[in-house]
Amino acid sequence: MKRLLKRLTGAFGPTGNEKRVADVIADRLGKENVFYDKMGNLVARISNEGKPKLVLSAHMDEVGFMVTEITDNGLIGFDAVGGFDPLVLLAKRVISERGVIGAIISKPIHLMSEDEKKTRTEIEDMYIDIGAKDRTDAENLVSLGDYFCFYSDFVEFGDGFIKAKAIDDRGGCAILCSVYDKLKDKASELDYDLYFAFTVREETGKSGVNYISERYRPDYAIVVEGTTANDLYSTPEHKKIARTGHGPAMSFMDGATIYDRSFIRDIMSRCDTLGIKYQIKGFTFAGTDAASYQRGADGARVAIFSLPVRYIHSQASVVKLEDIESTERAIIAAVSKKENR
Amino acid sequence: MINLLEKLMLTQGVSGREENICRAIENEIKPFADEIRVDKIGNLIAHKKGSGKKILIYTNMDEIGFFVNYIEENGLIRVCSTRGLNYDAAIYSEVVSENGVCGILIPESASEKPSYENVFIDIGAKSKEEAEKQVKLMDSFTCVPKLKKLGSEKYMGRPLNNRVGCLALIEAIKNIKNNENDLYFAFTTHAQAENYGSKTAVYSVDPDIVISVSIARKENSRVKLGDGACIKIKDARSACSVSVIDMLRNLASENNIKFQYEVDESSGYDLSLVRSVAHGAEIGAISIPCENSHTTAEVVCMNDVENVIKLIEVLK
């Protein structure tokens, strides 16, 4: 699992440019077992004709940057692809789709006026320095529309924690790959006709998953996602959202979805029986891919497993390996017949 | 009819928790439908077969409410809520859970504007442990339902929005006999959470004509209580099909059904969402004028409800 997670988090794949992530997954699952659709989503299936159709869904894309400007002195102006706190960007290393390495810079603090020091530096005021000497030099390496993403190592540290970029949602992708491997020869032991959807474009409008929902019209969908773990600092207990080490977080409601209570309860009781850790996530405004399944086509019953991730949407997102393992077990329990869990 | 309305109002069914209200409606209409089914997201869809046009008439059966989000050590309950919840109107109301547990919605401090961030439900529990014996995370609460007569023709209470719509469809289903058109009636879920019940119902029935039945907020549309069924012209996001407006107007005139027009200038997410999946179906809406929507003192006029029922019936 660790090796797979390292490969997946290391792959370049901002929203709209997920091909390299898809290729890692296809390589792992076996090219003959996967189907690329016209949007770039990757789908695998453990066929069980006649059983209710359940989609396990994780998105392949990560937050990143798109080049929008090249200045006379060779700096690269960019726009965010996906949601960022601008503060996490400053002085971070980034890499382009063509392998050009740079760092995100802004006006240094000693040159700022007193007023500027008090206000947050916004993305419009940041540039990527790729070490080019002028515009022509930069244009040889980078074009308008090129993508950049964080350039960040995979590091194990502390009490079973992993730091990498893009754990949201390569963590979900890794879990789904592993679940596929474990269940692919056991179709008869499953409660569902199982689809594995690795989707594109989640971070900007969820169009990848909308297409999957319309095309496959599942009866059930379980989304495997990353969510914010606010379990440090002095966050009030009721705002911690999800805690590392407590297993996958199951939501009952967020800003876009009221999850199917009977489906959630079924999954919870399966986990309880087997002693698999999970936590119930409190309300947050952000929506997830589950909304696309619930309201797409003729609808679906939906649930979500969210991996608690600290510093999500930064180059140093942190996950606890134990939570990845609990999520994998919870998914297997959710889809397997009673006697085979 | 008032007894049935009261029964529907007293059956709790917050968005995503529509099982009980769904069952109550199903029991009422079962003998009058050729087919009846509950779909994947809980919509109740009844079919009265006919050989003419395929018409889907839908109304939402869910209501606004709260969910238990977190239980504090001191036994107070933090909540989140469906869309449309007016915290200013709900604060200090008596509330009741889906399992009948009573409580009060109280503010954390009297000086802040109430929102889900700073209100609690007090169920009188001394501790988290005691509270957990009565409520669980995910349980729903609503302000206490009630129905009272107001003056000679009006009724007040909650949730008139949108149990009056349910009442109208139920009565029409009961009264329609030997229909020529192929009629589908959907009681939809999740209307207070972005309306995706109606969207999926329209998608799966795939009708020629779609007609929404709900309330018209007097505050948004200058409709008048007592002036009859509202035929919607447009809302803030989409215009109704001219063909449906004409059809409803003609049917109302021919059958002496009192009606008024509705132009809603400030709301209207539902019809635009429905149109996006209706595969070109003609879309219209009939509404029941309602005052003080989304408070504990919603007001409707029963004459308007009766006119709406008649207008649905003549669609046969």
Image (cartoon, rainbow, N blue to C red):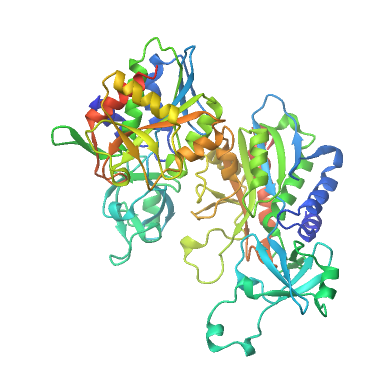
- Dividing the picture into quadrants, the one containing residue A26 is top right
* Residue B30 placement (x, y as % from top left): 40, 18
Which is nearer the eye, A151 or A307? A151
Q: Which residue sits furthest top? A: B178
Say whether residue A18 is visible: yes
Where the N terminus of chain B falls, by quadrant?
top left
Task: Please give left or right for residue A217 compared with residue B35 in the image.
Answer: right
Residue A114, compared with residue A207, is above or below; it is: below
Q: Residue at x 63, y 75 (%)?
A: A125
Q: Residue at x 33, y 51 (%)?
A: B86
Total count of labels: 0
Say whether residue A153 is visible: no
Where the C terminus of chain B falls, by quadrant?
top left
Task: Please give left or right for residue A279 compared with residue B169 in the image.
Answer: right
Residue B190, compared with residue B210, is above or below; it is: below
Which is nearer the eye, B249 or A314? B249
Which is nearer the eye, B307 or B243? B243
Residue B14, compared with residue A129, is above or below; it is: above
Q: Residue at x 60, y 87 (%)?
A: A112
* Residue B29 placement (x, y as % from top left): 38, 20
* Residue B141 placement (x, y as % from top left): 36, 45
* Residue A96 placement (x, y as % from top left): 79, 65
- Dividing the picture into quadrants, the one containing residue B5 is top left
